[in-house]
Image (cartoon, rainbow, N blue to C red):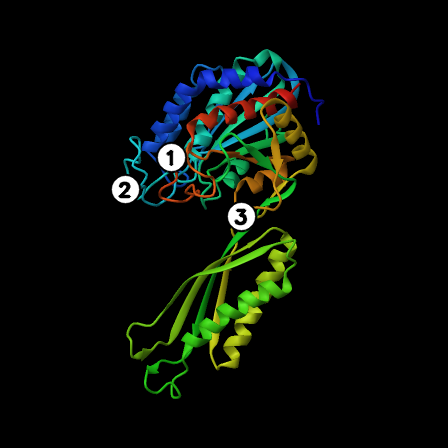
Amino acid sequence: MTEQAALDGPALLAEASDLLPDIVDLRRRIHAEPEIGLDLPKTQEKILASLADLDLEIVTGKETSMVVATLRGASEGPTLLLRGDMDALPMPEDTGLPFASDYPGVMHACGHDAHVAMLAGAAHLLAARRDELKGNVKFFFQPGEEGYHGAEFAIKEGLLESPKVDGAFALHIAPNMTSGELATKPGPMLAAADEIAIRVVGSGGHASMPHIAVDPVPVACEIVLALQSHITRTVDVFVPAVLTIASIHGGTAYNVIPEDVNLLGTLRTVSAESRESLHDSLERVAQGVAAAHNCTVEVTIKKGYPPTINDPEFTAMAVSVLSETIGETHLMDAPIMAAEDWSYILQKVPGCMASIGVCPPGVSPDAAPACHSNHMILDEEAMAVGIASHAAMALSYLS
């Protein structure tokens, strides 16, 4: 870890604010043309145009629309990776914004448009301060965060090499935090998220004669309750796990006992040990309940992203730098049970993620529509804090 240098936080914030009109414009243009998944040509085009005059070494993805732009400092030194994810969500937008999505059923509801814009702003700010950098900055514009494992693709294509990445930092917007506020925590910050599908199989029949059939409906309900009890009675509350059965589907008519019932849900954990243990025990519980009622059960667990675990030393450095230069950076009391594929980067490189508050003016953070809401909006003024935060991390790490 490099020694921290004194930074002029007000100057960084002033420079970031000067960039804000262009950054807001970039964010709004991306917001109006959202793209899903790994192939985001319009978003990539906007990013490349924004970076065109900065004398950066730019590489684009072979299998995805990623953009990796490397800023070489004035002298040799370590390399810091900064990330902004690019992709939107398959959902409607009902914000009423003048720059709302032009594409029905697609929306930037998780703030990735702001992430891209803030990172582009940081590239402009740091390019103007190239002579202060002893090392390199990699600006990583990543597609496919929303369930498409975009970071894994990037790692396979050499993201962390040439030059070798020594540290990594990312920001994620938080509409339910005060605008401009920063927060993070060492250790697990975000959860692993795995998909669960359970098929309970009985024997169909007439609703008037359940004793002749084997009704899977009450068995499915019992499995849901048993799984919830299992979580609360076997998992340490200080190493949280969250199981949500979000879909129960069975039957086609009011007077027909169906042959099967299908359950869908997610399991979220913050440790690899509890994740693996619960994969085994949840299936055992479901099978046991089903067997007690002469049903069979099929349990399928599809692994998603691993937990996002911030490196304690890097996180302590980030809290110190951001608190001293940008604004007080709070330590979170507990992890957030959402998931992120930034976790793949942090498995390879010491680094961290921090949250940046973007609660809209005049709205209480508790009442603001959260990420993944069709009504989610953000305070664009807070993007200046995001730009300056990226820059402060790079200037300190490469001092």
The quarter in which the N terminus is drawn is top right
Mark 3 or mark 1, earlier in chain: 1
Mark 1 or mark 2, earlier in chain: 1
* 310 relative to 363 in the view: left or right: right
Tell us which disc is closer to us: 1 or 2. 2
Residue 271 x/y as whole percent: 63, 52
Give the spatial CA distance, label 1 vs label 2. Answer: 16 Å
Mark 2 or mark 3, earlier in chain: 2
Q: Which mark, residue 305? A: 3
User: Quick one: SS at disc 1?
Assistant: loop
Whether residue 47 can be seen here:
yes
The quarter in which the C terminus is drawn is top right
Whether residue 59 can be seen here:
no
User: CB under 8 Å between callouts 3 and 1?
Assistant: no
Q: Amino acid at mark 1?
A: Leu
Tell us which disc is closer to us: 3 or 1. 3
Q: Which mark, residue 40? A: 1
Tell which of 340 and 369 is nearer to you: 369
Tell which of 179 and 256 is nearer to you: 179
Q: Which residue is mark 2?
A: 104
Residue 161 x/y as whole percent: 59, 30
Q: Amino acid at mark 3?
A: Tyr
Residue lying at 35% horizontally and 87% vertically, measured from the top left = 209
Tell us which disc is closer to us: 2 or 3. 2
